[in-house]
Image (cartoon, rainbow, N blue to C red):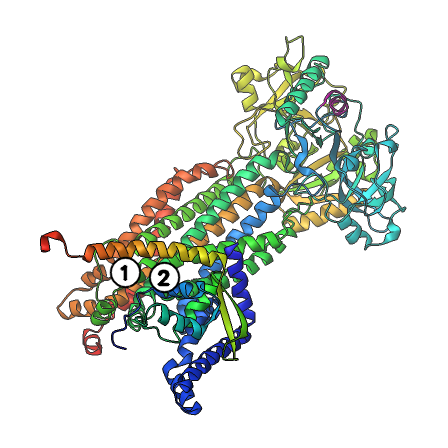
Amino acid sequence: MRIVDSLRFRIAALFQRSQVRAEMEEELRSHIQHRADDLESSGLTRAEAERRARIEFGASEKYHEAIQSAIGASFVTTWLQDARFSLRQLRKSPGFTTAAIVTLALAICANAVVFGVMDGLVLRPLNVPKSENLYGTLYGNNSAWQSYPNFLDLRERSHSFEELAAFNFAFVGFDTGKDPAAATGFAASGNYFDVLRVQPYLGRFFHASDEHGINSAPYVVLTYAYWHSRFHDDQGAVGRIIEVNKHPFTIIGVAPPGFQGTLMFVSPDFFMPMVNQTQLSGWDPNARGDTGGVFEEFGHLKPGVTFAQAMDDVDAVDAYLAKTYPREVVAKHTVLATEGLTSFGPPVRAFVTGLMALACLILLAACANLGSLFAARAADRSREVALRLALGSSRKRILRQLFTEAILVSTAGGALGVSGSFVLLRRLSTWQPLPAVPIHMPVNPDAKLFVFALVLALASGFLFALVPVRQVLRANPYEIVKAGSGARFSKRLTTRDVLVVIQIAICAVLVTSSMVAVRGLILSLHSNFGFEPRNTMTAGVNLAMAGYPTDKVPAMQRRMIDTIANIPGVEHVGMVNDYPPLVYASATRANVFKEDVSDRKPANATIMPYTYSVSPDYFAAAGTSLLAGRGFSWHDDRNAPAVAIVNRDFAIRVFGSVMAALDRNMTLQDGTHVQIAGVVEDGKYLSLTETQEPALFLPSLRTPTASAYLIVRSHRDPQQLAATMRLKLRELDAGLPIDLQTWNTLLGTVLLPSWIATMALGVMGFLGAMLSITGIFGMAAYSVSKRLRELGIRMALGATRTEVLSAALGRSLKLLAFGSVAGLIAGLLGTRILASIVYQATPRDPLVLAGAVIAMALLGLLATWIPAQRALSVNPLMLLREE
Amino acid sequence: MTDQAQLLPGTLDLLILRAVSLGPLHGYGILLRIGQISGNALLIEQGALYPGLFRLVRQGLLKASWGTSENNRRAKFYELTTAGRKRLLQETESWNRLAGAIATALAPQPEEV
């Protein structure tokens, strides 16, 4: 209450200052009149009495100020005075001011950007009502998705969800009549929008009641963004009939702006009913073993149901399915998580949190940097401070002025940093790293970010203004004025020294970790993938998009392979069904049994290799070397005995050696006996960080799929080759949608997380390096300037250059070495965390160690260069004459 | 005039509160009242009274209102609030304790006699 009253009084006083002043004057006048009345009654004339009364009272101005400060109106006035004074001071030393503001701006910018990403990906749930309660299944153990019948069973048998919906990806050709183009959609269960509780922006959504069996609901709902870009906000788009993979679909509605489906980093172009997926890809919704039908299932937990209960419930359904359909259901343990990040959640969260920690370190380093700058500045100004103290200024007032200065700097730095971060985040939100996949970073700089950055800036302002406080409080004006500034330079460890060491240690951590990351990325780019992505062009062709029925697919694919093989300069052409290894994290596993296993339930599986269906010349085209046996031929079709090719790891795990595996038989889940015809080298299949995994290759002629990638090995210029390939394929069928990229570009997906991590860490490392340069430079330059006179005397007495240098910079270099070692050790310990994201990020790499040491040494050299030059160029005569 | 005592720091507020406790007064009146109740033994600069008055008003111990004085002049009158009355009691008691303690300490000790 008291505080509120006092505040109200202050504010009222502020706004009614002239009124208060007038009242005050009237009161003082009234006082003088009363006194004059008394004097008059004692016999003086009125005029004389008034004169006497005024003299007795003294200068009323003196009391005005005392009254002002008593009622507190002066708070703002003095603050404005302080601010004006600080601005003047800051303008007087533009170098210091710029350095301080830029340092802080960089640190605040880094923090704000990371916070923006964290807010978008980790803190903010999916942009739908009650999303905090929305749980989904993560797509299972590194391989299979889910089959439609399994989804229906889960929906019926689980009791934890209000209602379950599901979705899958649909990469299709989308033809509005004028310009056929590839588009990404979500094939969703009919209740998708109802479960999410989203309302349409235009038209209507599809519902469970629209589904009447396979291909019964040819409807499309556009996302707002796609409606905007492809249909130019045309209200008439609703009701139009368009072609998806050459099948007519009706646009029935547009989703609201801001609704981008149920994955945070993929923004689809449209939604369509899952029951119509069959039309597009020949997918069989009734096949329990077809795990390609459903990507994720999700729903709101019922009120009162805990996460653990829901997990148990889902596990029970899993167990039921595994028991009831032992042949079809691939071993699977369903994991639930809040919907939005799928299985990327944990690594993304870990990485973003780690990045946030690094950004905080940057800010801390910047604060240490600014703190030592302010301390040095306060020391330089100790004479001025002493004079002000001697002239009667209070220490409180001087400190207040220091804080005002710090807050001005931090506000300016914060404002600069936050505007920089807004620009960067805007960029990031429209960033399209992969042309073929609509990856979308859900980052939108908002008020929350602004407040975060501002609070951070002000807090750091306070932090670094605290550093010189003790200095001012202890200052003894008489001593300082007598001795002159900078006369004392103690051997003791000062706060400033500690700050410099902390700062350098932090910077060394940043430099080390960014080096580990960069080195890891370089190593992973040159590691053995089990194929050779250089000089290889890929062509993704989904014949379903061009309307080919399944039985026409093998012949067409053979024609495409032959056509491209005839292009001059093409050495080998192979084909792999769906996606090549490592692309779009799409590897699928199969259960494979030893020949003598009779009960082929998942639990009895001998091995679960990644499985690919490939054409005869695939291994030659991919550059995968055959270790033993033979590759596939064009005769290995459904009429020939079934054969398979395995990788080395498979052969060794099951048969002990490469040679022992040849000509042995294995059984697939569907009962097919396959004979191992050859063994190829090991490779990477799902991710670069995986440990060695077994792989099984089957002839694509036995299980043709419409979606496949052609692998073309050629030493021709990729641009030219791509143009020729496009031309030749168009000659075959003008309506083919073709995705032409070099294999290295296609691998961008698998390397993208590493790339982003490395880029982010690289930027952090760079910031760290910059901060350490400014920190060491500030420290060294300051110590040289303080000791110029001493150095001059030493030189005059015959000190050598080395002695002068060691006197001038020895301390800085010692601090640098100390901080660097501490930082290196911390950095190496910290990089264990990195190893989970950046492939081959090992801290025990001698190159990284050497690199970090050399980097810190170089930074030190660079930062002390100018001060060293200054120390060496001291002219003793000039210097001694000056003082 | 020379035998007037300097005010101890902080005692002016107490004197003001005491003066006003006997009834609403304007600034000059407070000055006269302090002189009267202290037997003109205390020296108070006339203007120094006002910062103290404003401070006490801000602290909510006094309240002020404009009125007409006995000389028929416009003047600002001060009177005690409840909080002011309570504060006066506390301060008086603690002052008495302090004064008593100092008087005891300064009194001739038996061994001095």
Labels 2 and 1 share a subunit: yes
Residue A689 in picture, x, y percent from top left: 53, 34
Parent chain of label 2: A
Q: Is residue A542 above or below residue A413?
A: above
Q: In front here: A675 or A739?
A: A739
Q: Which residue is mark 1?
A: A474
Is residue A447 shown above or below A670?
A: below
Relative placement, left or right, of A312 versus A170 is left
From the top left corner, tell me how far across and down residue A50 is, in percent: 42, 87
Query: What crowding class fits label 2: few (fewer than 14 Cα within 10 Å), some (14-19), or many (20 or more)?
Result: many
Tell me the element at label 1.
Answer: helix
Question: Quadrant location of residue A807?
Answer: bottom left
At which x and y percent is residue A117?
58, 47
Quick check: marks 2 and 1 in contact, CB under 8 Å? Answer: no
- In this figure, which residue is indicated by the disc labeled 2? A373
Q: Is residue A112 visible?
A: yes
Q: Does the magenta segment cover residue A231?
A: no
Secondary structure type for disc 2: helix
Q: Nearer the viewer, residue A639 or A231?
A: A231
Decide if residue A689 is on the left or right side of residue A480: right
As drawn, B39 above or below A437? below
How dense is the environment of label 1, judged by Cα within 10 Å: few (below 14), some, or many (20 and up)? few
> Dot 1 falls on which chain?
A
Q: What amino acid is found at the position of numbered circle 1 in the picture?
A: Arg
Q: How many marks?
A: 2
| Image coordinates for residue A55, horizontal then vertical, percent | 37, 85
Which segment is the magenta one? A150-159
